Image (cartoon, grey):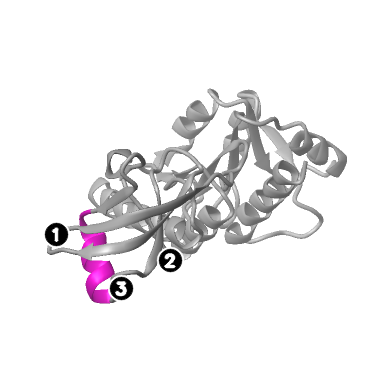
Amino acid sequence: MHHFFVSPEQINVSDRSVIILGADVNHIKNVLRMRTGEEFSVSNGQDSREYRCAVLTLEEDRILGELRFIREDKVELPARIHLFQGLPKADKMELIIQKAVELGVFRIVPVAASRCIVKLDHKKATARTARWQGIAEAAAKQSRRGLVPEVTEVSDFGRAVEMASEMDVRLIPYELAQDISKTRRLLEEIKPEQDVAVFIGPEGGFAEEEIALALENGLEPITLGKRILRTETAGMTVLSWLMYVLEMR
């Protein structure tokens, strides 16, 4: 079943109707070639409700759907996970964003750490952020999320640490951290509704001065095990652990 995001005012529960506007109209009509009576679902981007619908009319600039029922399943994680991802090489960031959204991330902050090979000027960073946001939206549709995670503008490391200072839990995988019992405790102590920052370094990891700054500002070093993980694997590992401890309670 195809899933779309609409603004809350496009859902009218009282008269059981849903209106789809914008680029999704062309996608439904000319790419998916949906017909009257075919089912789809929508989310309003603000809660975990899924609105199940069927196509009533296919008009030139909008799709009118019949609201059939509302699912109240809580598809979003109980806590808000903010992934601070060091910019990786090539197109790895696109894969990271896609999989992070599937695993339930709330927000992704690209971080221009000192060891990042990729260097983006303002114009390129703006264009890249727009593309990354599109990838997040597509992944949210595919995984039928209740909201589209935000991909922020690229931040330097100092600004990223400052942003994380407002959060309840701050974690940074670090190869010199070896206490797996502490890592387990930190994860298991995360409570619903908390904001959790997870810092992942680029290829080569964070520089020593960046680790020092992180620790000075209250980030907790954790271990991801005895093996060294690639940047595109490390974040997925932490998110998978968090999904497990938050949803299996």
Give the image location of residue 26, x and y in percent. 21, 67
Residue indicated by mark 2: 91
The one nearer the camera, 57 or 30, is 57
Q: Measured along the vertical axis of the image, is residue 104 above or below residue 187? A: below
Q: What residue type is labelled 1?
A: Asp
Does label 2 or label 3 sit earlier along the sequence?
3
Left or right of 247, for residue 19: left
Residue at the (80%, 53%) spot, across then down = 225
Image quarter of residue 226: bottom right
Does label 1 or label 2 sit earlier along the sequence?
1
Left or right of 61, for residue 54: right
Residue 213 in magenta stretch: no
Give the image location of residue 189, x and y in percent. 76, 31
Spatial CA span between label 1 and label 2: 34 Å
Residue at the (22%, 54%) spot, across then down = 21
Q: Point out the stretch of residues depicted in magenta.
A: 21-31
Q: Do tag 1 and tag 3 residues touch (Cβ < 8 Å)?
A: no
Spatial CA span between label 1 and label 3: 15 Å
Residue indicated by mark 1: 61
Q: Is mark 2 on a helix, strand or loop?
A: loop
Q: Is mark 3 on a helix, strand or loop?
A: loop
Spatial CA span between label 2 and label 3: 32 Å
Left or right of 170, for residue 62: left
The one nearer the camera, 219 or 39, is 39
Does label 1 or label 3 sit earlier along the sequence?
3
Q: What element carries label 1?
A: loop
Q: What residue type is labelled 3?
A: Met
Residue 26 in magenta stretch: yes
Q: Which mark is residue 34?
A: 3
Q: Do tag 1 and tag 2 residues touch (Cβ < 8 Å)?
A: no
The one nearer the camera, 144 or 167, is 144
